[in-house]
Image: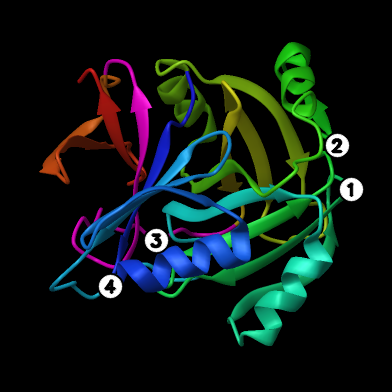
Amino acid sequence: MAIASVLINVADIDRSVDFYTRFLGLVPVEVTSGSAVLDAVTATVRLVRLDQPGESSWIADDLQAGFRHIGFKVADLDERVQALRNADVPFQLEPIHAEGDVRITFFYDPDGTLLELVEGPLQYHEVYDRAEVDRDWGLGTPDRPRFDHVAETVNDAHATHEYFAGLGFALMGGIHQPSDPRGFEITYLHGGDTSIEIFEFSGAEKSARAPQLDAPGFVAVELQGEPPAAAAPLGEAHGRRLYADPDGLVQAIAGA
């Protein structure tokens, strides 16, 4: 199983299509006045226009449980960062050499969705499934930016691993953050050619966020399978049945 698509609410379809094609190299598949589907190699990004958006409760704090960011693998991080700077795109984190021997940077799309660029194959400190790591590395250096993962902060990493195992994701590897006083650990769940990046903080208190379907920014990941027992039904939006895991990450689960 894999992430088939990422659903994002936007205020202006043309503006967002321009942003994702110009800075991330996504390829338009279908564009209308109210929505757009963009190809990101391993998944699609689906943009939906909100005519009367609510105020988002998402904050740029990894201690807020639920969705954190969308990550893309790139071969040319410096070139893309310069293009973003030239266009005055706001950064959350300037490029750094991160744990796992990769270079990363974080910035915002026009509606406040946090995006990450990752350059280089991640060197896991802990390997839990060698076959999945080899499959991940086997994708190689992308010719154009490739969707890689969605990140989520959780209260119980083990319970989250079990939740997504029911949707076909395998526990692949882990990265330690020894310099972070919050007890920050990252694990990676792999399905198909996509991943879910799990943040856990053993030494810091986390806040909760109720799922929002009518606010700008990230809405859901689209998966296939039967909803796990712990999935909370949220009703229907954009023609899809939506559920949330115990930490508030929303999933549109086909077949549900």
Does residue 106 sit above or below 230 in this rendering?
below
Residue at mark 2: 123
Query: Which is more N-terminal, label 2 or label 4?
Result: 4
How many angstroms separate mark 4 from mark 2 (CA)?
38 Å
> Are circles 1 and 2 on residues that touch, CB within 8 Å?
yes
Query: Which is more N-terminal, label 2 or label 1?
Result: 1
Does residue 177 sit above or below 207 in this rendering?
above
Q: Which residues are magenta?
A: 204-226
Density class for disc 4 (Cα within 10 Å; few <14, some 14-19, many ≥20) is many
Task: Give the residue type that dot 3 points to.
Answer: Ser
How many angstroms separate mark 1 from mark 3 (CA)?
30 Å
How many angstroms separate mark 4 from mark 1 (CA)?
36 Å
Q: Which element type, helix, strand or loop, lies under badge 2?
A: loop
Residue at mark 4: 11
Query: Which is more N-terminal, label 3 or label 1?
Result: 1
Residue at mark 1: 101
Q: Position of residue 55 (x, y in %)?
A: 23, 75
Q: Which element type, helix, strand or loop, lies under badge 4?
A: loop
How many angstroms separate mark 1 from mark 2 (CA)?
6 Å
Describe residue 121's horizontal placement relative to residue 251 as left or right.
right
Task: Give the residue type that dot 4 points to.
Answer: Ala
Density class for disc 2 (Cα within 10 Å; few <14, some 14-19, many ≥20) is some
